[in-house]
C-alpha cells in the first residue's frame, strides 16, 4: 500500500510542472471575453517558433506593416502587424554572439551581431551585405535609405554606404508608365523580392563624439542633398550629424547640444508638416537630469526645455501635437510639442504603449496596462497584463502589442477601430495618398469619357438633335424662313430668286430698288428705297 501511494505521489509530482506550465501559458493570453470587458478585442495572437528552454525574446520592433522579434539566439522573426501571420524567420549572425536591437528602413533591416554588421532584405530576410565593424559596438545600427550608422563604445559613429543594384530597364526609362494597379503591384512585389546591394567594400565615413555612444542613433532628414543622423552619449551630448549626399566624403557634426547629465533614452523626432511651407522638424531628447529638450532641425536652435524634476530613462513619445514623457519613479507628463507647456500629469505611469482618438494606453510599475483619457490624463480603466512584460511602444497607430520573453505575441485594438487609427507622419502620408488616388481616379474617368459634358448627345451629332440640321429646324433652310424658296437664303417673299434684297419691282441690277432712276439715286424712290426723297443723304 505504501509503495502504491508513493508511485501515485511521484506521478502527480511529475505532472504538476506540466499543469503549471499549461496554466501559465493560458494566463498569458488575454481572452476575448476579458478584452471585451475593457472595450477591446484581440484580433490575433501567435507563438514564434523558438526553444523556450534556451532562448528568450530580446527585442521587439514595429516598422511599417510588420513586427520584428529578435531573440538572444540570433533569430529574427517577421510578423504581419495586422494579421499575426509569420512572414519569415531566419538566423542573422551567430547564435553565441550578442545581437543589438535591429535597425529598419523602407527596404532594409540591419543587425549588429558581435562585431559584424548584417544588412538584410526586410521583406524576406535574405542577407544582402555583411562587414566587420572593427571595434566594440555600443548599440544597434540606425538605417537611412543609403547608409547604416553603427555607434561605438569609444564614441565613434561609423556610416556604411549601401548601394543598391537597380533595374537597368528602369534606369533607361523603358518601364511602361501607363500601368494598371495590378501591374504596379506586381512590379513592386518583384522589386521587393529581388533587392540587391553592391558587394564591393566602400570605406565607411566616421565621426567622433564626446563620451560613449551607447544608444541607438536616429535618422531624421533624408533628401537628395543631405541626410541627418542623431545620436546621444553618456556624457550628456546630443550630436546632430550631417552627410552631404552630393560629395559623400564625410560625416560631420552640424550641431551639438550639451545637457547636465547623460542621455540614456533614444531621441525622437517630429517630422515637419508638408502642408506648412518652411516647417521644420523637431528633435526631442530626454536626459537623466529630468529635462526634455526640443531642438529645431533646420537651425539647431533650442525651441523649449521642460523640467520633470525626476530622471528620465524612457524615450519621449510624439503623437501628433503632443509629447508624452514617463519618469523613472513613475508618472507621465503630456506636453504641447509647439510650446513646451504642460497639459497634464498622471501618477504611477512608467511607459507609453499606444493611443487612439480618445484614449491612451500606458503601463504602470507593476506591469498593468492603464487606460487614460487622452485630453485630461484621468484614469478610465485597468487591465491585468503583469504576465506580459514586453509592451511595444507604438506611436504610429492605435494597435496594442504585448509579448512574453518566451515568444507569445498578441495584438489588441478597440472594438470599433477595424482600420488602424494613424498618427503623425503616417496619417499625413495616408491622407496624401488617398487624395492622390481620388484625383487619379477622376482623371481616369474623364479619359474614359471623351465628352463628359454632353450626356444626351448622340454619337455623331455634336448638337444632340439627332438630325442633319445643325440649327434644329429639320429643313434645308438654315434661317427657318417659312415659305421662302430653298434657294433664297433670306426668305424675301415675292422677290425674284436672283434679287438678294427682295426689293419689289426694282430691276435685278439695281441693288437699292430705286424706281425709274436706274443706277441714279436722284429719282422718285420706291417704298422700299431706304433713301427716300427728303432723307436721301446724296440728294
Image (spheres, rainbow, N blue to C red):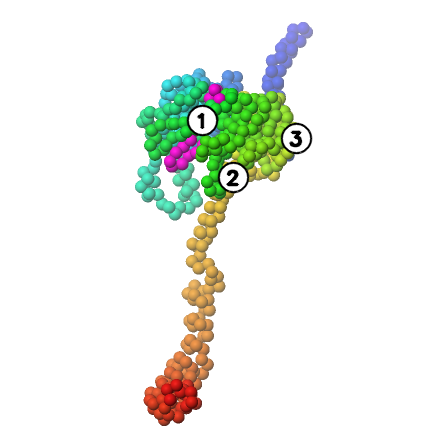
Q: CA distance from mark 2 to mark 3?
A: 26 Å
Question: Residue 52: horizontal and vertical position, in percent?
Answer: 52, 19
Please tell me in which quadrant of the rendered image residue 158 appears: top left
Q: CA distance from mark 3 to mark 1?
A: 39 Å
What SS does tag 2 mark?
Answer: helix
* Residue in view at x 66 percent, y 30 percent: 379
Q: Nearer the viewer, residue 399 or 14?
A: 399
Among the two numbered marks 1 and 2 on one chain, the one whose residue lies closer to the N terminus: 1
Q: Quick check: is 230 in the magenta stretch?
A: yes
Question: Residue 296: horizontal and vertical position, in percent?
Answer: 48, 33
Q: Nearer the viewer, residue 241 or 62?
A: 241
- Residue 83 drawn above or below residue 173: above
Q: Classify mark 1: residues with Cα within 10 Å, few (<14), some (14-19) or many (20+).
A: some
What SS does tag 3 mark?
Answer: strand
Q: Badge 2 is on which residue? A: 427
Contact, mark 1 vs mark 2 (Cβ under 8 Å)? no
Question: Residue 478: horizontal and vertical position, in percent?
Answer: 42, 75
Q: Badge 1 is on which residue? A: 256
Residues shaded magenta: 220-236
Tell which tag, 3 or 1, sits nearer the viewer: 1
Label at residue 297: none
* Residue in view at x 58 percent, y 22 percent: 310
Contact, mark 2 vs mark 3 (Cβ under 8 Å)? no
Q: Badge 3 is on which residue? A: 379
Q: CA distance from mark 1 to mark 2?
A: 31 Å
Q: Quick check: is 120 in the magenta stretch?
A: no
Tell which tag, 1 or 2, sits nearer the viewer: 1
Quarter of the image with the C terminus in it:
bottom left
Q: Classify mark 3: residues with Cα within 10 Å, few (<14), some (14-19) or many (20+).
A: some
Among the two numbered marks 3 and 1 on one chain, the one whose residue lies closer to the N terminus: 1
Among the two numbered marks 2 and 3 on one chain, the one whose residue lies closer to the N terminus: 3
* Residue in view at x 51 percent, y 32 percent: 303
Amino acid at each position: 500500500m505504501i509503495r502504491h501511494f508513493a508511485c501515485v505521489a511521484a506521478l502527480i509530482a511529475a505532472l504538476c510542472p506540466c499543469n503549471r506550465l499549461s496554466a501559465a501559458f493560458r494566463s498569458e493570453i488575454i481572452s476575448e471575453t476579458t478584452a471585451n470587458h475593457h472595450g477591446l478585442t484581440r484580433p490575433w495572437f501567435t507563438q514564434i517558433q523558438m526553444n523556450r528552454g534556451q532562448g528568450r525574446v530580446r527585442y521587439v520592433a514595429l516598422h511599417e506593416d510588420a513586427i520584428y522579434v529578435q531573440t538572444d539566439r540570433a533569430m529574427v522573426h517577421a510578423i504581419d502587424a495586422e494579421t499575426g501571420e509569420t512572414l519569415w524567420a531566419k538566423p542573422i549572425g551567430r547564435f553565441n554572439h550578442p545581437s543589438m536591437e535591429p535597425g529598419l528602413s523602407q527596404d532594409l533591416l540591419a543587425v549588429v551581431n558581435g562585431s559584424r554588421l548584417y544588412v538584410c532584405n526586410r521583406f524576406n530576410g535574405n542577407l544582402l551585405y555583411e562587414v566587420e565593424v572593427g571595434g566594440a559596438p555600443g548599440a544597434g545600427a540606425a538605417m537611412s535609405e543609403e547608409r547604416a550608422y553603427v555607434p561605438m563604445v569609444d564614441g565613434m559613429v561609423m556610416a556604411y554606404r549601401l548601394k543598391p543594384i537597380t533595374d537597368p530597364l528602369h534606369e533607361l526609362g523603358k518601364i511602361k508608365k501607363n500601368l494598371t494597379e495590378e501591374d504596379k503591384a506586381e512590379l513592386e512585389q518583384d522589386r521587393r523580392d529581388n533587392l540587391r546591394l553592391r558587394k564591393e567594400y566602400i570605406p565607411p565615413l566616421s565621426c567622433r563624439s564626446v563620451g560613449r555612444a551607447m544608444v541607438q542613433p536616429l535618422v531624421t532628414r533624408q533628401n537628395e542633398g543631405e541626410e541627418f543622423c542623431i545620436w546621444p552619449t553618456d556624457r550628456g551630448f546630443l550630436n546632430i550629424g550631417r552627410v552631404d549626399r552630393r560629395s559623400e566624403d564625410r560625416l560631420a557634426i552640424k550641431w551639438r547640444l550639451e545637457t547636465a547629465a547623460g542621455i540614456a533614452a533614444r531621441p525622437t523626432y517630429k517630422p515637419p508638416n508638408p502642408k506648412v511651407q518652411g516647417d521644420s522638424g523637431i528633435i526631442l531628447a530626454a536626459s537623466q537630469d529630468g529635462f526634455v529638450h526640443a531642438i529645431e532641425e533646420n537651425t539647431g536652435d533650442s525651441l523649449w526645455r521642460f523640467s520633470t524634476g525626476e530622471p528620465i530613462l524612457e524615450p519621449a513619445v510624439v503623437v501628433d501635437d503632443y509629447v508624452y514623457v514617463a519618469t523613472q519613479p513613475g508618472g507621465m507628463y503630456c506636453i504641447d510639442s509647439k510650446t513646451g507647456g504642460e497639459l497634464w500629469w498622471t501618477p504611477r505611469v512608467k511607459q507609453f504603449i499606444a493611443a487612439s482618438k480618445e484614449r491612451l494606453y500606458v503601463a504602470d510599475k507593476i506591469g498593468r496596462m492603464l487606460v487614460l483619457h487622452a485630453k485630461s490624463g484621468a484614469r478610465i480603466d485597468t487591465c491585468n497584463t503583469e504576465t506580459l512584460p514586453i509592451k511595444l511602444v507604438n506611436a504610429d497607430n492605435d494597435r496594442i502589442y504585448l509579448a512574453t520573453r518566451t515568444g507569445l505575441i498578441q495584438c489588441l485594438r478597440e472594438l470599433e477601430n477595424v482600420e488602424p487609427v494613424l498618427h503623425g507622419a503616417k496619417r499625413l502620408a495616408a491622407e496624401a495618398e488617398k487624395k492622390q488616388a481620388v484625383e487619379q481616379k477622376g482623371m481616369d474617368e474623364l479619359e474614359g469619357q471623351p465628352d463628359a459634358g454632353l450626356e444626351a448627345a448622340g454619337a455623331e451629332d455634336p448638337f444632340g438633335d439627332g438630325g442633319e440640321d445643325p440649327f434644329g429646324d429639320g429643313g434645308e433652310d438654315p434661317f427657318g424662313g417659312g415659305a421662302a424658296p430653298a434657294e433664297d437664303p433670306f426668305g424675301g417673299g415675292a422677290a425674284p430668286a436672283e434679287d438678294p434684297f427682295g426689293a419689289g419691282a426694282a430691276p435685278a441690277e439695281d441693288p437699292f430698288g430705286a424706281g425709274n432712276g436706274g443706277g441714279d439715286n436722284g429719282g422718285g424712290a420706291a417704298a422700299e428705297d431706304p433713301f427716300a426723297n427728303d432723307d436721301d443723304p446724296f440728294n
